[in-house]
Amino acid sequence: MGQLALLYLWLKACVLVSIPIDKFENRRHVHVFPRLRGARGKYSVAKVWLESHGQKQVEIYESSLSAKENDLLLRIINANWEYINKQLTKSFNGEKTYPKEIKLK
C-alpha cells in the first residue's frame, strides 16, 4: 500500500492510500484511512473516485464519514488533485511515495 497524503478533516487526521491491486480497476481512486495515535487505522472510512474515462471527476463512492467531513474531504482532494494523482501514478508504478500534510487553505 502506498501512502499518498495526510489530510486533516476537522479534528481528525486521515491518510489517503493507494492499494496496488486497485490499478486494475476501471476508475482511479484512493482509500481514506483514519490516523490513530501516529499509525494508520485498520479499516478504510471512505473510497473516493478521482476520475472517469481519464478525466478528473472527484466523487465519494462509499463513506462512513459525516456529511460535513465528506464535503471537506472532496474540497481538499479537488484543491490538491494534481499532487494526489501524481502520487497515485508513482504508487502504481512501484515507486516510493512520500506523503505530505494537506490542509484546506
Image (cartoon, rainbow, N blue to C red):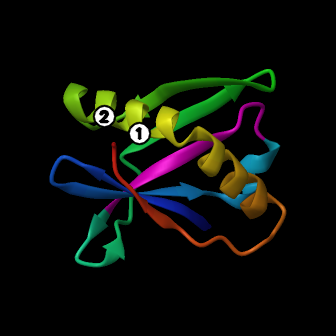
Q: Is residue 73 above or below residue 13?
A: above
Left or right side of 54 for 45: left
Q: Number of marks in the image?
A: 2
Residue 32 in the magenta stretch? The answer is: yes
Residue at 84% across / 62% down in the picture?
Answer: 93
Tell me whether the residue at label 1 lies in contact with that at label 2, contact meaning CB atoms closer than 8 angstroms. Answer: yes
Quarter the C terminus occupies: top left
x and y percent of residue 81 in the render?
A: 58, 39
Q: Circle 1 sits in a helix, a strand or a loop, which is it? A: helix
Within 10 Å of disc 1 (Cα), the crowding (few <14, some 14-19, many 20+) is some
Nearest the viewer among 88 and 64 is 88
Report the front residue among 25 and 93: 93
Q: Whole-percent x and y of residue 1?
A: 62, 67
Q: Position of residue 9 (x, y in %)?
A: 26, 47
Name the mark on residue 72.
Answer: 2
Q: Residue 58: where, in percent of width, then height?
A: 55, 26
- Farthest residue in the bottom direction? 38
Report the side of 17 relative to 11 (left or right).
right
Q: Residue at x 67, y 45 (%)?
A: 85
Find residue 87 and report its image quarter. bottom right
What span is in magenta?
25-34
- Three-letter amino acid code at disc 2? Leu
In the displayed structure, 54 sits above or below 12; it is above
Residue neighbourhood size for the residue with mark 2, other residues' Cα within 10 Å, grouped as few (<14), some (14–19), many (≥20):
some
Q: Main secondary structure of the magenta part?
A: strand
Q: Which residue is mark 1?
A: 76
Name the amino acid, label 1.
Ile
Q: Secondary structure at mark 2?
A: helix
Q: In the rendered image, which quarter is residue 66 located in?
A: top left
